Amino acid sequence: MSAHHKGLLASTLTLALVGCAVVPPNAGDNPNDPLEGINRQTHALNMTLDEYVLHPIAQSYVDYVPEPVRDSVHNAYGNLREPRNAINNLLQGKVTQSAVSVARFLINSTVGIVGLFDVAGYMNLERAPEDFGQTLGSWGVPAGPYIVWPLLGPSTLRDTVGYPFDVAADPSTYLYWGESDLIPYSLAQGALYVVDTRAGLLATDAMLATAVDPYVAVREAYLQNREFEVWDGNPPIVFPVDEFEDEDNEN
């Protein structure tokens, strides 16, 4: 499994986005969630896993591992995503961002000691994260129905289709290719990535605790954030059709 794959386990906790999400009054009837019954059951399973396994481990990680060490681990995993960023930026026609992603990977993999230090960041080469789900969205492919996968967490049909391409673009996919005796190292690497990602979301737990409907909060946060990412922070404004119909009737 690639680092990106394992990281999706922690995307069950996309709660970092909850604070930015605006949950409409009728969000429970979201037409983008035709599988809500099944999704809610899967969401409950994932939250139980988090409560009894992921959260305690992530909290201990933060409490006992020095911050400089945690920062280096986080940087290393971020560096492994740079090839994916480069490819998807290029597919979206963002040539400059693609070149920056390539430069970041080369600099941090060498001078930054396999990505442990974000040297490129100090050179003002900022990370430009992109994935194939975003690329498909930029090509006009609709998000499709919202899906909650066991362990992997929230997604959409479009993001699910794009996921295998992101795995293929992740160098860690090939680190232990065909080496069965190295499987324990692969699993350890994946587990550390999940813990690192979950640790970054600990501060958002209080937000979920105050949500009237945690499932809806996570769903709306995920969908809104993905739309935000596809449009690079400038999603088009969509006016409800009923609004225009009401104006016509008044005239």
Image: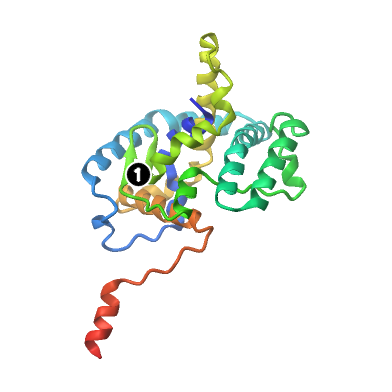
The structure residue drawn at horizontal position 24% and vertical position 45%, both measured from the top left corner, is 35
**Residue corresponding to mark 1:** 157
**Can you tell which quarter of the image residue 176 is in?**
top right
The structure residue drawn at horizontal position 26% and vertical position 42%, both measured from the top left corner, is 40
Residue type at tag 1: Leu
Q: Is residue 166 above or below residue 18?
A: above
Q: Position of residue 69 (x, y in %)?
A: 66, 31
Q: Is residue 242 above or below residue 118?
A: below
Badge count: 1
Give the farthest residue toward the bottom: 251
**Residue 156 visible in this rendered orientation of the protein:** no
Near-viewer residue (215 or 132): 132
Q: Position of residue 213 (x, y in %)?
A: 29, 51
Q: Is residue 158 left or right of residue 181?
A: left
**Residue 83 visible in this rendered orientation of the protein:** yes
Q: Is residue 163 left or right of residue 61?
A: left
Does dot 1 land on a helix, a strand or a loop?
helix
Q: Is residue 192 left or right of residue 219?
A: right
Q: How is the image coloured?
A: rainbow
Assess disc 1: are there few (<14), some (14-19) or many (≥20) residues with their C-alpha within 10 Å of its C-alpha. some
Q: Is residue 225 left or right of residue 125?
A: left
Q: Position of residue 62 (x, y in %)?
A: 56, 34
Q: Position of residue 230 (x, y in %)?
A: 48, 54
Identify the image quadrant of the C terminus.
Answer: bottom left
